[in-house]
Image: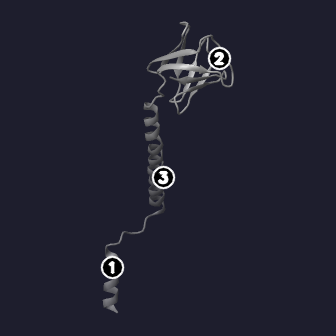
């Protein structure tokens, strides 16, 4: 019987004593904070990668009257870019400033006054109903 107690003592000697309630709560909060940081990092890394990508909008475009007719005679436009600032130019030299507001959206100022969505084929669908197809 004494040998059994000695063996039991040997088995439990290396075990950690039970945590108090305060220690359990502290460990729980640490795990929650670590989990929250890991989740934020998982969302932040792809977001940073997307922010670095920008739409390929530089070039010449042909206005396609779908579903609305093109607003100008001669349907050729061009876009130049410096950072997020864009310059939309009609073939008759009419110029509008615009801004790349995300990697797929453009906000065009006067005379366009439209919001554009850059489509996967690099054409731009404008809120005024016209489509600019990249040449």
- 82 horizontally vs 108: left or right: left
Most distant residue in the right direction: 68
Q: Residue 99 at what x, y percent from top left?
A: 52, 20
- 62 horizontally vs 84: left or right: right
> Gap between marks 1 and 3, in whole Å?
32 Å
Q: Closer to the camera, 127 or 22?
A: 127
* Quadrant of residue 106 within the rendered picture: top right
Residue holding disc 2: 70
Q: Residue at x 30, y 90 (%)?
A: 3
Residue holding disc 1: 11
Q: Residue 44 at what x, y percent from top left?
A: 46, 40
Q: Residue 2 at what x, y percent from top left?
A: 32, 90
Residue holding disc 3: 32
Circle 1 crowding by C-alpha within 10 Å: few under 14, some 14–19, many from 20: few
Q: Nearer the viewer, mark 2 or mark 3?
A: 2
Quick check: 3 above or below 131? below
Circle 3 crowding by C-alpha within 10 Å: few under 14, some 14–19, many from 20: few
Quick check: 59 above or below 4? above
> Gap between marks 2 and 3, in whole Å?
56 Å
Q: Earlier in the sequence, mark 2 or mark 3?
A: 3
Tell me the tag on residue 98.
Answer: none
* Label 3: which secondary element: helix
* Label 2: which secondary element: loop
- 27 horizontally vs 4: left or right: right
* Label 1: which secondary element: helix
Q: Residue at x 59, y 19 (%)?
A: 63
Most distant residue in the bottom direction: 1
Marks 1 & 3, CB-CB < 8 Å contact: no
Task: State the quadrant of the N terminus.
Answer: bottom left
Q: Closer to the camera, 60 or 98?
A: 60
Q: Earlier in the sequence, mark 1 or mark 3?
A: 1
Q: Residue 104 at what x, y percent from top left?
A: 53, 30
């Amino acid at each position: 019987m004494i040998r059994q107690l000695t063996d039991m003592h040997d088995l439990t000697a290396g075990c950690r004593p039970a945590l108090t309630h305060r220690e359990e709560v502290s460990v729980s909060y640490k795990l929650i904070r670590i989990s929250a940081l890991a989740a934020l990092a998982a969302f932040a890394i792809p977001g940073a990668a997307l922010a670095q990508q920008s739409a390929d909008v530089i070039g010449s475009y042909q206005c396609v009257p779908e579903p609305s007719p093109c607003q100008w005679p001669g349907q050729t436009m061009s876009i130049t870019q410096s950072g997020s600032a864009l310059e939309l130019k009609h073939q008759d030299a009419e110029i509008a400033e615009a801004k790349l507001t995300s990697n797929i959206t453009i906000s065009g100022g006067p005379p366009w006054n439209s919001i554009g969505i850059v489509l996967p084929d690099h054409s731009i669908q404008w809120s005024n109903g016209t489509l600019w197809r990249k040449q």
